[in-house]
Amino acid sequence: MTAPKFEKQNHHYVPQFWQRGFRATNGHLFARIGNKVKIVSTKSTMQVDWLYTIFDNQWRPSDALEDAFSAIEGHDAQLLQRLHTPGYITTSDDEAQLCALLGLQASRHPDVLQRGHNLSREFGKLLASVHDVSLEEFLALVGSYGIDPSDGHDLYISLKSRTKAQLAEELAAMLQLSPQSGQLPLQDAIRAAPKIEATIAGMQLRLLDAVPPLAFVLGDTPIPQSNLILGFSVPLSKSLAVIATSAGPGKSPMTRRVATRQEVGGINRIQFENALETVIGPSADLLKSL
């Protein structure tokens, strides 16, 4: 059997095409890491080696997921190019693609992948304790994981048909799985991307243009990792950002206007505060001012 393709090591959790939009006019990209600011290359920023490497049942590594991301990113780069074209009028397809871009970005971050893996293990522990709770208690517990009462009831009956010893043995086997295991891969959290996309699609989107000398920056955690429905902002380049707010009953197509100085400053401050360690932008002075 032919081994799967495995050639890519340098995996970016914020795509390089997105980062390049924050370069200065001379092509330089500045990064603030801690209190230090320096010129960097997108090849070495916002990346983790082998983050999206997946393994088959024979423990053979594969580039399949990273290759799939590369194909998606090619289309998303074209979207951002259109949005930056002077006079371009956005379409409903553009808005839908932007929602998909943001949904994927929200689910592919290393912190989110690890959190999803941990939640899977916590859920396994909950299932293994089914003999210690009533049906009502079980439905409430699994409901917090998004399981509806009907499915929860069927799950309860199925699990109760197994002994405590059987469930304990299955739990022990699950807890021993490597994060790279095909049975419980770290990358499983990416399956949430369509649901996040749908949530964002139900919000009111507005594009904001930063007119020079104003400019946006981008942190290594571009999208908040919880409570997106409450509203959020994301810079798409040094000159463009998107704001998502609750739409209510009167959702309208995505709009666009010039950002105020206060809006640019507020969005940049959020990027700086949410960043794990790195913020990029077109100016060393701008990054130092955060």
Image (tube, helix red, strand yellow):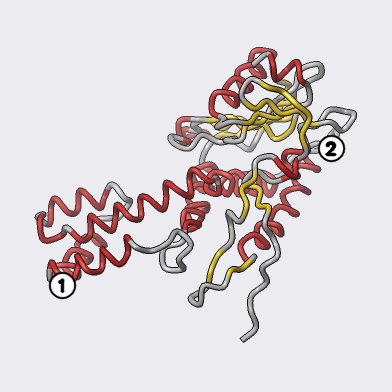
Residue bearing the label numbered 1: 162
| Residue under the image location 15 percent in, 72 percent down | 162
Residue 216: which numbered mark, if any?
Answer: none
Residue bearing the label numbered 2: 85
| Residue under the image location 38 percent in, 63 percent down | 177
Q: Nearer the viewer, mark 1 or mark 2?
A: 1
Q: Which of the 4 image quadrants contains residue 166? A: bottom left
How far is disc 1 from disc 2 in space, using C-alphas?
61 Å
- In the rendered structure, the answer to whether residue 115 lies left or right of residue 49 reads left
Tell me whether circle 1 and circle 2 mark residues in contact (CB < 8 Å).
no
Q: Which residue is nearer to you in this view: 158 or 274?
A: 274
What percent of the width, then of the height, locates residue 230? Answer: 45, 30
Image quarter (top left, top right, bottom left or bottom right) of the N terminus: bottom right
Total marks drawn? 2
Q: Is residue 162 above or below residue 102?
A: below
Q: Is residue 96 above or below residue 89?
A: below
The local crowd at label 2, few if under 14, some if 14 to 19, many if 20 or more residues have their Cα within 10 Å, is few
What percent of the width, then of the height, locates residue 229? Answer: 46, 35
| Residue under the image location 81 percent in, 16 percent down | 213
Outermost right residue:
26
What percent of the width, then of the height, locates residue 128? Answer: 20, 61
Q: Looking at the picture, which amino acid does disc 2 mark?
A: Thr
Q: Is residue 200 above or below residue 73?
A: above
- In the rendered structure, the answer to whether residue 208 lies left or right of residue 157 reads right
| Residue under the image location 42 percent in, 50 percent down | 116
Q: Which residue is nearer to you in this view: 7 or 227?
A: 7
**Mark sitting earlier along the chain (1/2):** 2
Q: Which residue is nearer to you in this view: 23 or 97?
A: 23
Q: Which residue is nearer to you in this view: 151 or 27?
A: 27
* SS for dot 1: loop
Q: Which of the 4 image quadrants contains residue 155? A: bottom left
The local crowd at label 1, few if under 14, some if 14 to 19, many if 20 or more residues have their Cα within 10 Å, is few
